[in-house]
Image (cartoon, rainbow, N blue to C red):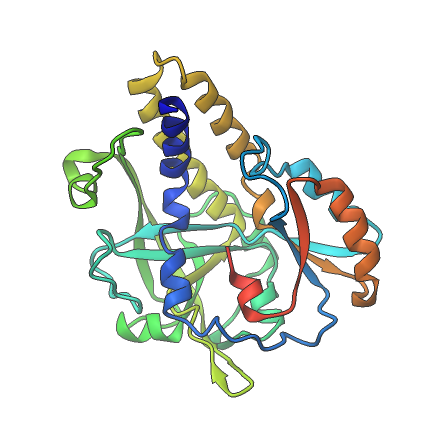
Amino acid sequence: MKRKKIIKAFLFVICSVIFLYTDMIVGQSTLKIVNQLSNEFSPMAKITFNPNINVIDPNYEKVKLEQVHEIANLDEVQEIEYSLDFVLFNQDLKNPYDDPNTPLNEFIIIGASNSQFVLLKEELILLKEGRSFNEEELMNTTFEKVPVLISEEFASINHLTVGSDFCLDNSIYFIPLYSPDLDSEKLYVDSNLVTKETYNFNVIGIFTQNKINGIQVTAFSNHIFMPETFVELARNFYFTNAHNAHKKVYQNESWWDEIEEGYQFNLLNQKASTTLFILKDATKWNDFEAKANAILMPSHQVKRISTVHDLVER
């Protein structure tokens, strides 16, 4: 039982930076609305956990990227969007979602794989100033300054305009894999910092959040959109260094090999769980669902995205 708790603790630690902001997004937004994005025949779908299986199934959380590629090649699929996300920090910038209970000042970064990514395409956000990404920026893998789109709320409180620069940190702190009394105030201190990278960003566009049936969407004030290639680099830096720090301490433990295997799987398949499928013809949903679920079952299934909540829910 202790071994299982340690393994679960590791998976929590290695992924905690991604899910740290989930409650913030849901609690401080209008995502409880159930308005249709377009109509009941939405052409979008995502992968979700199959609630009908027992959660002790050892494969329940493992969606493979090869499964995603197989679904992407179905006749019904027009394109896919990965929407990788992550969290970076800056203690000096002002945050539209200032939370005194959060030990670090967090900013959510979202990867875009095309200039008209889904939030722009569905007009949940609208470009107010500047432009979206060009093809060269989306394909780039090295950045002196990362091009970004920011919300007008974030721009206003930090006095940023199109052309402005700012910095964010990718900080890795050592978090024990097994400790029943973790104190976040003692964890996120300089003495517990493993390493960090500081990235420079350049504002190329400022977006405003649209209204859905008269209700103002506010979920994206703290979101910073940038090329997906950069988000993947930032995630890899974090996970590699967090993994190496834990390996140095725990590699002689009997349970480490299982953790190592899980780490390698998650690193290789990190895009899988964030995939958004866009269909050629929304009326072909039943055909798509049957084929996709045959690839994903029993652990996972596809779900039609028909609401704002469905679209941004992690």
The image shows residue 213 at horizontal and vertical percentages of 56, 85
Looking at the rendering, which quadrant does residue 246 occupy? top left
**Of the pair 240 and 162, the residue shown nearer to us:** 240
What residue is shown at x 36% (from left), y 27% (from top)?
6
The image shows residue 248 at horizontal and vertical percentages of 31, 19
The image shows residue 1 at horizontal and vertical percentages of 39, 24
**Of the pair 242 and 313, the residue shown nearer to us:** 313
Q: In this view, does 186 lie to the left or right of 89?
A: left
What residue is shown at x 69% (from left), y 36% (from top)?
66
Above/below status of 243 relative to 273: above
What residue is shown at x 19% (from left), y 34% (from top)?
192
**Of the pair 118 and 313, the residue shown nearer to us:** 313
Q: In this view, does 86 lie to the left or right of 176?
A: right
Q: In this view, does 135 lie to the left or right of 71?
A: left
Q: Is residue 256 left or right of residue 287?
A: left
**Count of marks, rendered view:** 0
The image shows residue 276 at horizontal and vertical percentages of 64, 55
User: Extreme bottom residue here?
Assistant: 214
Looking at the rendering, which quadrant does residue 122 occupy? bottom right
**Of the pair 177 and 52, the residue shown nearer to us:** 52
What residue is shown at x 46% (from left), y 41% (from top)?
233
